Amino acid sequence: FFSGIFWSLSLPSSTFRSLPPVTRYSPASALVFSLDFYLNNMADAEKAKGNAAFSAGNFDEAVEHFSAAIALDPSNHVLYSNRSAAYASLKKFDEAHTDASKTTELKPDWPKGYSRLGAALYGQGDLEGSVEAYNAGLAIDPANDTLKAGLEEVEAVLARQSANPLGGMANMFSSPDVWAKITANPQTRPFLQQPDFVEKMNALQKNPNNLGAHMSDPRIMQVLGVLLGVNVQTPDSFAEGEGIDLGAKKAAPKRREPEPEPMETDEEKSAKKCKEDAIKEKELGNAAYKKKSFEEAIKHYKAAIELDATDISFITNLSAVYLEMGDFDECIKQCETAIEKGREIRADYKIIAKAMTRKGTALEKKGDMEAAIQIYTKSLTEHRHPDTLKKLKECEARLKKNTEEAYLNPELAEEEKAKGNEFFKNGDFPNAVKHYTEAIKRNPTDHKLYSNRSACYMKLVAFNEAKADAEKCIAIDPTFAKGYTRKAGVQYFMKDYNKAIETYQEGLNKCGDPNNEELKKGIQSCAHMMNAANRGELTPEEQKERQERAMQDPEIQQILSDPVMRKVLNDMQEDPKAAQDHLKNPMVLGKIQKLVSAGILQIK
C-alpha cells in the first residue's frame, strides 16, 4: 500500500482472533508495515520545518524542529549540523559546539561538519581551536570555499590581535552592539548628539587598531569603560593612578599642594540650608504617612516643596498621600505637576516614569482604564519598570473583561441565533456563522451556539474551526450528545476513523443515553470504513492520505518512536514466536490495535 521495503508476518488464528472485530479480515491475514519509512518521513518533515524556520530567522523554532527530527533519526549527521547552525545564530555557542562535534563524530569525512565546528569555536573565543577545525575540513576538501573563508576570517582576527598593543580591547569597538550600549548608558548617551564623536566611533569600527590615536579623547575613554563594564575616568585621572590599567607605564604621581577650601557665599549657604530643611520635612512626612496621618504628611510634604522646588520626589510623595486618601483628582494633578516640573529641571527619567505610573493608578481607580493604559504605556517609554508593565497588562485584561461583560445579553443572543438558523436553512453558511458568532459574544455559555456554528464550519469545509467549536460545546456541557456527534463528524471526514470511534464512544458514556441512535450509527459507519481500508478497498490516494494524517497524531508518533514497540515490530518480521508472546501483553496489543486502526499497520 506504499512504496518502500515491505515486511510481512502471518499471525496464527488464535492470535488473530484476539484482535478486536474491527481489525479482522481473515485468519490467514498478513501484517504489513514499514517502520523506518515512517520514522524517516517524520524526521524529514521536522527537518523541512526547521529549515523553513531558519530561513525566516526564527532560530528558536528551528532548534525545536531539528531536535524533534534528531529524536526520530539520531544517527543523521545533517540534523546535528543544522541544529548547530541554529544555535550559533542564537549565540549559544556551547550548544553549537556540542552539535558540531557530534556531526564530525557521525560523519568524519564531511567537510561541512568542520565548518560548523570552526564557527562554534570562533564564537566561543577559541580562535586557535577554530583554525584547527577549519584546517581539518580543508584536509578533506581543499577547494571548499566556505572553509577557506572561515579560516581567513579567523586568521585575520588573530593577526589584528597580535599587531594591536592594546590586545582585544580595541576589537570591542567593532562589536555590533556597541551603539546599543552607548545609548543605554546615561553618561555616554549625550555623546551621540555630537557629530565629531559619531565620526570617531565610525572610524574606530572600521579600524579598531587606531584606538591609541583617540585615547586622549575623554569621551572615547568613557565609552571604553562602558564596554569593559568599569568606571573609566578622564586622562588626568589616569595620571593619578585611577581608572583602568591599559598596559602602559604609569608616570609617577605628582604631589599636589593642599588647596584652601572655597568660601561659601551667603546665597549658597541659604540654598544649602533650605535643602537640608526640606529633607527633614520629607522625613517627617514619610513618618506621618506610615502612621496613616495623611493630613500631617501633606503639611510636611508641602513645606518640603516650598523649601526646595528642585526635588520632584516631594511632589510624587504628596501625590501618594492623595492616592491613599482616595482623592484621585488631586493625585492626578500633583503627578502632572511633578512630570511638568521634572521636564523643566531635567530630572531623572525614572522619577518622571514613577509619577506617570502613579497617575495611571489614580486614573484606573477612577474607572478610566483607557486613559490609564495610555499613561502606563508612556511611563514604560521613560523607564521599563516591571511593576508598571504588570499594571499595564492587568489593566488591559480588566478593560477587556469589562467590555465583554458589558456586551453580554442573552435575549439578543437568542435573536442572533434565530437569524443564524434561518441563514443555515437557506444554505447561506457564511452569514449563519456571522450571526452565531455574534450570539456567542452575547452569551458565551450557551453550548448549543457552538454546536450550531460547528455545523456551519463543516459545511464550509473548515474542519479545524468545526472541531474547536465542538470541543468547546462539550466542555460547557459534557452531557450534550450533539457535541460528540459534531466532533466525531469532523474526524470522520478527515478519515481519522479510530479517533471518531473514540469520540462516539465517549458520547455514549457521558450523555446519559447508552442507546443513542446517532452515536451508535456513527460508530458503525467508522467501523465499516476501517474494515474497507483493511480489505484494501480504498484507492491508493485515499490510503496514502489516511496514513499521512495518522502520522501527524502525537500518540501514533510516540508509539512508533518507543524503543520497546520498535523491538516488538522488528520481532514480528523476524521471530513469529516472540511476536505471539508480545501480543499476550494487553498494553502491546492495544498499541498494535491503535496502529492498525490508524492505517499504519494493514491487515491483508
Image (tube, grey):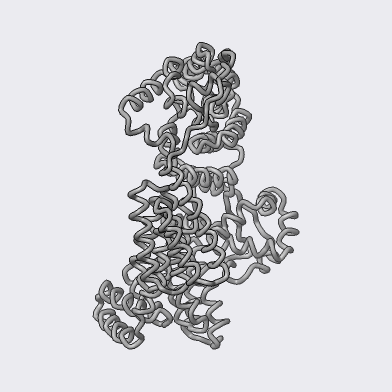
Residue 334, position as x, y percentages in the image? 38, 63
Residue 358: x and y, percent?
43, 62
- 257 in relation to 423, above or below: above
Residue 444 placement, left or right of 423: right
Between residue 47 and residue 412, name the one nearer to us: 412
Q: Nearer the viewer, residue 493 or 569?
A: 493
- Answer with the quarter of the image where residue 194 lies: top left
Q: Quadrant of residue 240?
A: top right
Front residue of 316/26: it is 316
Q: Is residue 127 left or right of residue 428?
A: right
Q: Quadrant of the C terminus?
A: bottom right
Number of labels in the image equals: 0
User: Can residue 420 be seen by looking at this rendering?
Assistant: yes
The residue positioned 48% from the left and 83% from the top of the image is 480
Say which residue appears at 44% left-offset and 50% top-offset: 350
Is residue 531 in view from this perspective? no
Q: Residue at x 32, y 83 (%)?
A: 417
Q: Looking at the picture, tell me which residue is in the foreground, 117 or 299.
A: 299
- On the picture, is 71 further left or further right than 271? right
Vertical placement of 554 versus 173: above or below? Answer: below
Where residue 344 appears, x then y in whole percent? 33, 49
